[in-house]
Amino acid sequence: MAASINGVLEQTLQKSINSCKLLVVGAGGIGCELIKNLVLTGFHDVELIDLDTIDVSNLNRQFLFRKEHVGKSKAEVAKESALKFNPNANIVAYHDSIMGPEYGVDFFKRFALVMNALDNRAARNHVNRMCLAADIPLIESGTAGYLGQVTVIKKGLTECYECQPKPTQKSFPGCTIRNTPSEPIHCIVWAKHLFNQLFGEDDPDQDVSPDTEDPEAAGDAGEVALQSEAKESVAGGVARKSTRMWAQQSGYEPEKIFNKMFRDDIRYLLSMENLWKKRKAPLPLEWNNLPNTAQDGDHSAQLGGIRDQRVWSICECASVFAESLKLCKDQLMNSGDCGTLVWDKDDEPALNFVTSAANLRAHIFHIPLKSKFDVKSMAGNIIPAIATTNAIIAGLLVMEGLKILSGNIDKCKTVYLNRQPNPRKKLLVPCVLDKPNPKCYVCSEKPEVTVRLNTTTMTVHTLEEKIIKGSLGMVAPDVEIDDGKGTILISSEEGETEGNMGKILSEFGIRNGSRLKCDDFLQVYNLNINILHVEKLKEDKEFEVIGDIAELQAQASADNTGPDTNSQEDDDDDDDLIMEDEPTEITTPSRKRKANGASDADLSTKKLKRSIDANCQEDEDIVVL
């Protein structure tokens, strides 16, 4: 190892490396490169945690893994492979979630430095809070295709990971997905829901039948539809039963399922006449009468080429739909009596099913069709991971770590890796670290946030799961109403407030101006939530979190200036890159009350946006992850 040769590193730095205890969170694309770099640099005491197991799709870029490792723990295999580079290293591997109760503040305080190689925002938020609570430096990283970023986070010195709001992943109202799709992504989401209805776990929120409660269809929404409902039948005249049960009883017959989804349900939608007063009405498809074009006559331009990268004709889509339906049915039968399938972008029949179903629905609603390649990217919200990008970012992680161990944290930078050289012919753009945001609802002296919601319709369960845990990233929250009585709304003690979950917030006296005191003992984190009651939010949102009260006032002012004339953003433009969050288990601790506590794996789900950072040493546009 060159790093251990005398003179390569300063003697004091070499001693710091030898004695430093490091925590690496994540053993995926960046993590594999990072653990290799660390042991070759001379780090001897490294602990590594990752909940994930090795998948075949990991092998092309996560080079510590081989075919024989598929299905095994990433952390355990990464440890064994890294030891071949430096057998003298002491590596401890955990096949676990960093958000578990056993990885509390005392666990984090054992380390001189934490390095994140994660791929989802929830875990990033959690590690950020744990490092703030333990007051130890965190080096954060992320990649997306050819783009990458490394930054250093230190309590009181720099911005924390949550100082700046992150764009939330795009979601769509159920009535848009079920009744009035207008974009390819709407059809892809519907097709994934159909897959789950036929082969996966039953989820009422993923119903694919026409939504008769669509407010836009009110009034003379269609007498045929209303009469059908009155007769206790659903779209297509199929008696009320689950989609899975109906499909099983029909033997998963492709023609029957095709005609139900793409003919009968569409005719049912047509009976909801209000929906089509200002929209082009959909055109039902018939199994025995299919057009032989890709979309509006563009099939001739698609002939030839790689099948996955061209748009299929409607006849091809129907054929693939039937074939993939049969293959998925066989997989389901082989999984046992109570088995279910989980949609996976790397499972060929599952991807073919979603591609064909999405394109058939797109054709019906006059929406451009997409190739299988495009559907795979959009359905998984993925950007192809590039091994060289991961390698560069992992190298930068170590370089920033060496600055910290040298006592030069003030010389650390946020470094951006761009897709192509800037005007000064540089791919790497270093920027001065930003100071903490005094209004951050995580690292400020008095964390506070305002939430807009309807107190007369929102339940305590929704408040806990979607807002406090989901949006605000807490793991084991205790919530008290600031009403002078100390009313406990939510408790981290298992079962203590279970009876509150189904109740409406207003039943507890929560109204406009109410204040909630939230405390997460695991993260050693306190937050005050100000409730702002609104009857209805834009775009049918359930709630809206606003970190800065000034932002709220600015929004209110803007709302009063006149109607919003902005068209809806398209989150699926070619310039919008969205990174997939691989499944990461988030364990909700059952451990009780105040104890020192707190918490896997290349980028949180977020848009990549163009911006100019005034602190950057280069004055051109940089890509911010």
Image (cartoon, rainbow, N blue to C red):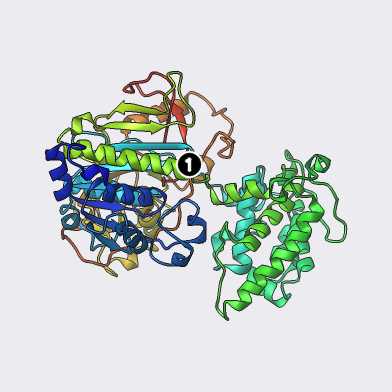
Image coordinates of residue 132 in percent, x first then y, are: 21, 45
Please give left or right for residue 525 compared with residue 302 in the image: left
Image coordinates of residue 170 in percent, x first then y, are: 51, 44
Eyeballing the image, is 484 above or below 568?
below
- Of residue 43 and residue 573, the one placed in the foreground of this image is 43
Residue for badge 1: 537
Please give left or right for residue 23 compared with residue 294 in the image: left
Is there any visible trace of residue 491 in the rendered image? no
Is there any visible trace of residue 376 in the rendered image? yes
Q: Secondary structure at mark 1?
A: loop
Please give left or right for residue 187 compared with residue 557 in the image: right
Q: Which residue is located at x 38 percent, y 65 percent? A: 73
- Three-letter amino acid code at disc 1? Leu
Q: Which residue is located at x 73 percent, y 61 percent? A: 321
Image coordinates of residue 610 in percent, x first then y, are: 46, 28
Please give left or right for residue 325 compared with residue 339 in the image: right
Res 156 quadrant in image: top left
